[in-house]
Image (spheres, grey):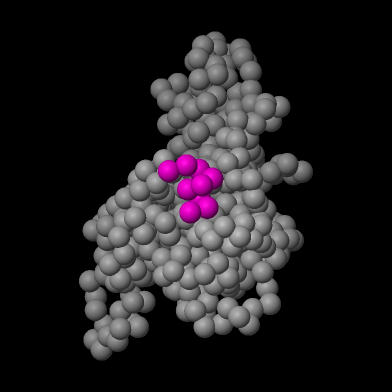
Amino acid sequence: MESLRELYRIGRGPSSSHTMGPASAAARFREAFPQADSFQVTLYGSLAKTGRGHLTDVAVKDALAPYNTCVVFHTEAAELRHPNTMDLEAFRGGERLGGWRVYSVGGGKIEIEGQPSTAPQDVYSLSTFSQIRAYCEERDLRLWQFVEESEGPEIWNYLMDVWKQMKAAVYAGLHTEGVLRGGLSVQRKAKYLIRQRHIDESAETRENRIVCAYAFAVSEENAGGGVIVTAPTCGASGVVPAVMVYKQEQQGFSDTEMVRGLAAAGIIGNLIKTNASISGAECGCQAEIGSACSMAAAGLAELFGMDLDQIEYAAEVAMEHHLGLTCDPIGGLVQIPCIERNAVAAMRAINALSLANFLTHTRKISFDMVVKTMYETGRDLFSKYRETSEGGLAKMYAE
């Protein structure tokens, strides 16, 4: 598996696969053709069908600026190798210089057809939770110690930057009001949630309100093009920060303990990314929100000092009950139902932690099994329910 640096990426929203990936591809393409004076970018599949809502065209044009760039949305293409496919062409004086076919495969990562993979070398030799658990149990290691052994102590500086940005996104979102651009007139709600105490608020109600406010805050920052951390994607970036920031404030965990929790969460995200998918276009929202919930549950379990069996159960429960979740963003925007889903998943991660505390010894399903199930479920989903905005809420919604 790759480094956690490839999973946790700091960048601008609203989509790792539809904004960050295409922008990265365009920037690299421009470097490859420095003599070009104009470009054409053709978007296919999910990039074409939801690209406007995800600001794909804006991200690509910004990356290729100041040169003239024509963006074509080709929505009818079939038989694509990956649902997030794009062609980039460079021109000088009207003459074509060359082109690339690029796949945005999730989490901001891209693959260029016909070119050797530029992906970083794997730093983890083990690629299933059962392997990692056996290795750690044999050596009496916690997951964060396994991460340090695999990545080196320098990973903590990177994860500390990730943690600082997660907190910054929470606090930025809590202090911002207004309507998100895109045409749906979605009002930012995080500031309202954090300020409006229930008239008879119990401890449980307060926890729900605060955690949801934090999830809304990051998700609204993402939808507004703010700087967030993919965890594992932009569209699901609110779940992990919401629960981790809340628990630090509630329990007084140190920043060192927090990044250890992020390391454990990262292992879970990496396993899903390696053995299944974190792309909504490939496997539906279960691959994004489900993965984020699973990561958050594992991170919390690490924070609270649970054993490996309990961490696995928390992560498994969180994913199992997102199986089949469709990706149907209205208007292709990462707003409805995406923002609320982050809040609901954050609370579900806390619920998974509680179940793991009591019921781990009764479990029948392994984390590896539920990851495999998620991938098969996602591949079986009708294409309209995999980030095309052609089915579900996106189809049923009327202004």
Q: Which residue is found at the position 37% from the left and 59% from the top?
A: 258
Front residue of this view, candidates 7 and 337? 7
Q: Which residue is found at the position 34% from the left and 68% from the top?
A: 247
The region drawn magenta spans 145-153
Q: Is residue 68 magenta?
A: no
Up-down: is 306 above or below 202?
above
Which residue of the protein is positioned furthest toward the right in this rendering?
79
Residue 45: image quadrant is top right
Residue 346 in view (yes/no): no
Residue 368: image quadrant is bottom right
Q: Position of residue 349 (x, y in %)?
A: 48, 71
In the displayed structure image, the side of residue 352 where residue 277 appears, left or right: right
In the displayed structure image, the side of residue 58 where residue 44 appears, left or right: right
Q: Position of residue 300 (x, y in %)?
A: 44, 67
Front residue of this view, candidates 246 and 36? 246
Residue 310 in view (yes/no): yes
Q: Which residue is found at the position 52% from the left and 83% from the top?
A: 358
Which residue of the protein is positioned furthest toward the bottom in this rendering?
200
Q: Position of residue 109 (x, y in %)?
A: 56, 40
Q: Which residue is found at the position 66% from the left and 57% from the top?
A: 131
The secondary structure that dominates the magenta segment is helix
Q: How many marks?
A: 0
Q: Position of residue 145 (x, y in %)?
A: 48, 54
Residue 184: image quadrant is bottom left
